[in-house]
């Protein structure tokens, strides 16, 4: 009995170099099974079995791997700072997002001019408004650091939050134009090969993180950071819409009317959600201003 148990554990926890070999062999065989036109059934079944076994061996080692990575990240000075300081992570995402949006806006304008595409011009407008919103928040974040009074920081932060609320409504107009173009022109998005699965996984990850972060920063204790998370949520919703267009293009039944109805329904839902977000941002700022005025009146009376 002990002999079979040892064999079982050795099979479940093979040497690291064996896992590396298994991973590479599984990958090559799966590519051959999926892409090979005349792949024998025996080879296909063997590749599925081998890849399943490799996946199991990787999964059972995952807690140890995660623990080692976690220890390494916390022992390193730079990664530890990144993991422990939330404000630093938010600033990195804000500055990085600004750079990406500017690049996308320029790229879409150039490609739209070359191909005379309404879709590309609409996406350029969408990315331009996102760039303006992020630039405003970057500028206000920099100027806030120079202020000594917490009251002044709070007021400037709320003003930035309010402007982002109005810009969110403007962003919604750009998104509405995109939805109209998709529905009326029956626009399609065609991703090559297995790329659509990777994009789908990344999109759902972004949506999940956007929901978590928006809930975490729902209160406007730091208005600039709260605005960043709401921008992330709007961006994730638009990604879900474009992913649906791509999925229907790839896997739809070529029924144009049904695809238009589905895209129109999802696009309308996205626009409504973003409108509600913008209204909540504006009404929330108004309540915060009223509360601050009441607090200042109480302090003056005292």
Image (spheres, rainbow, N blue to C red):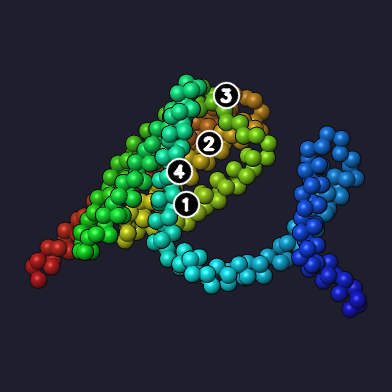
Residue picked out by circle 2: 242
Is 14 above or below relative to 92?
below
Closer to the chain start, of discs 2 and 3, is: 2
The residue lying at 56 percent from left, 33 percent from top is: 245
Give the residue drawn at x 48%, y 23%.
114
Q: Are marks 1 and 3 in contact (CB under 8 Å)?
A: no
163 or 290: nearer the eye?
Answer: 163
Q: CA distance from mark 4 to mark 3?
A: 35 Å
Q: Earlier in the sequence, mark 1 or mark 4?
A: 4
Q: 10 Å neighbourhood of mark 4: few (<14), some, or many (≥20)?
A: few
Residue named by callout 4: 100
User: Which mark, by number, is residue 257?
Assistant: 3
Q: What is the CA distance from the residue labelled 2 to the residue labelled 1?
A: 17 Å
Residue tagged by mark 1?
A: 210
Task: Report x, y in % for residue 18.
Answer: 80, 62
Circle 2 packing at 10 Å, graded few (<14), some (14-19), many (20+), is many
């Amino acid at each position: 009995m002990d002999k079979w148990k040892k064999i079982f554990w050795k099979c479940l926890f093979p040497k690291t170099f064996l896992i590396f070999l298994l991973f590479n062999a599984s990958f090559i065989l799966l590519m051959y099974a999926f892409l090979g036109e005349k792949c024998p059934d025996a080879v296909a079944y063997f590749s599925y079995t081998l890849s399943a076994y490799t996946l199991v061996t990787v999964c059972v080692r995952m807690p140890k791997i995660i623990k080692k990575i976690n220890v390494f990240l916390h022992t390193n000075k730079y990664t530890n700072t990144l993991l422990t300081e939330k404000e630093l992570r938010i600033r990195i995402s804000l500055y990085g997002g600004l750079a990406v949006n500017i690049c996308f806006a320029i790229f879409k304008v150039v490609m739209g001019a070359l191909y005379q595409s309404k879709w590309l011009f609409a996406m350029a407008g969408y990315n331009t408004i996102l760039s303006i919103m992020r630039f405003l928040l970057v500028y206000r974040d920099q100027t806030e650091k120079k202020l000594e009074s917490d009251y002044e920081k709070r007021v400037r932060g709320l003003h930035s939050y309010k402007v982002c609320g109005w810009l969110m409504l403007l962003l919604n107009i750009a998104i509405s134009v995109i939805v109209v173009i998709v529905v009326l022109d029956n626009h399609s998005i065609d991703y090559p090969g297995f790329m659509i699965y990777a994009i789908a996984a990344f999109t759902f990850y972004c949506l999940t993180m956007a929901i978590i972060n928006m809930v975490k920063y729902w209160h406007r204790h730091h208005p600039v950071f709260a605005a960043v998370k709401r921008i992330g949520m709007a961006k994730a919703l638009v990604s879900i819409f474009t992913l649906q267009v791509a999925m229907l293009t790839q896997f739809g039944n070529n029924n144009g009317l049904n695809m238009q109805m589905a895209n129109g329904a999802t696009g309308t839902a996205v626009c409504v959600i973003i409108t509600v977000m913008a209204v909540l941002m504006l009404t929330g700022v108004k309540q915060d201003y009223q509360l601050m005025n009441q607090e200042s009146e109480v302090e003056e009376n005292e």
